[in-house]
Image: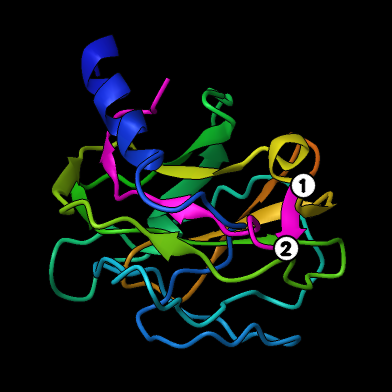
Amino acid sequence: MTNRSLGVRRAAMLAGPVALLGLLAGCGSGDDTANAPRTESGTTTPSDGTSSAPSGVPTDAVSNSLTPSAPQSPVGGTRCHTSELSASVGRNNPGAGQENFPVVLTNESNRTCTLHGYPGTAFVDASGKQLGPDPKRSSAEPETVKLTPGQSAWAGLSFANPEVSGAGTATPAALVVTPPDEEDPLKVAWKSGEVPVSGNESSVRLIPFSPGTGA
């Protein structure tokens, strides 16, 4: 991805209201932030900017980045399944009071598959408890990203710098990532410090997947 196109994508991350903290962007709607959230899939549907999606956080202990073992055979369609992917979080690219991270999924299987839409995302503590409110999705039009074996796609995750916004903070143990239309999540150890979890500026904003790693 060129520096120009990356700048355009990252500019989209700053559009709209200042972003809030990341929880899973599932397919439903509603403003609940359950203490014991259930696992939901990522989604292909943009948010309307006023509602957020159900949470989706596993309750098992947090681990480092997970690369699933032997990928399972796809059951119809060409979409990438959780068992065929690994997840990681790229380097922060801060700007205009925002913290901007690429959430990267890589095809670890031996077949070509596709991603279309938004990941489910959630910050969790060491016990697996969700931290902060559910995310908001941008109105950007998702594209279908084709991944040959070894290729990656990234989705943008941004939130207001807590020192700028004054939001309440917590330090997550991990970011939970669920691929579009899947229910099984991946976990990535979070190593980038505090994130906003309460107050008016505590929500994450997501942009849909694009080809590459966002670097």
Label 1: state its secondary structure: loop
Q: Is residue 184 left or right of residue 122?
A: left
| Residue name at image x 38 percent, y 75 percent | 50
Q: Residue at x 50, y 83 (%)?
A: 54
Q: Amino acid at mark 2?
A: Gly
- In percent of width and height, residue 213 lies at 39, 28
N-term-proximal mark, 1 vs 2: 1
Q: Counting other residues with Cα less than 10 Å from the Cα at mark 2, is it few (<14), some (14-19), or many (20 or more)?
A: some
Q: Is residue 144 left or right of residue 190?
A: left
* Residue 214 is a magenta residue: yes
Question: x and y percent of residue 7 in the render?
Answer: 31, 21
Q: Amino acid at mark 1?
A: Gly
Closer-to-camera residue (195/164): 164
| Label 1 sits on residue | 166
Residue situated in front as seen by the camera: 89 or 13 = 13
Q: Quadrant of residue 26?
A: bottom left
On the image, which quarter does residue 33 sit in?
bottom right
Residue 31 at x, y percent in the picture: 53, 85
Q: Is residue 38 left or right of residue 103?
A: right
Asked if marks 1 and 2 touch (Cβ < 8 Å), the reply is yes
- Calculate the distance from the C-alpha at mark 1 to the C-alpha at mark 2: 8 Å
Name the residue tied to disc 2: 199
Q: Which residues are magenta?
A: 195-215
- Decide whether the magenta segment is chiefly helix, strand or loop: loop
Q: Is residue 200 left or right of residue 98?
A: right
Q: Is residue 170 above or below residue 199?
A: above
Mark yes or no: residue 106 visible: no
> Residue 202: percent from the left, percent from the top?
65, 58
In the rendered view of the protein, which quadrant contains the N terminus?
Answer: top left
Q: Nearer the viewer, residue 208 or 185?
A: 208
Residue at the image point whose x is 36% and y is 30% from the top: 10
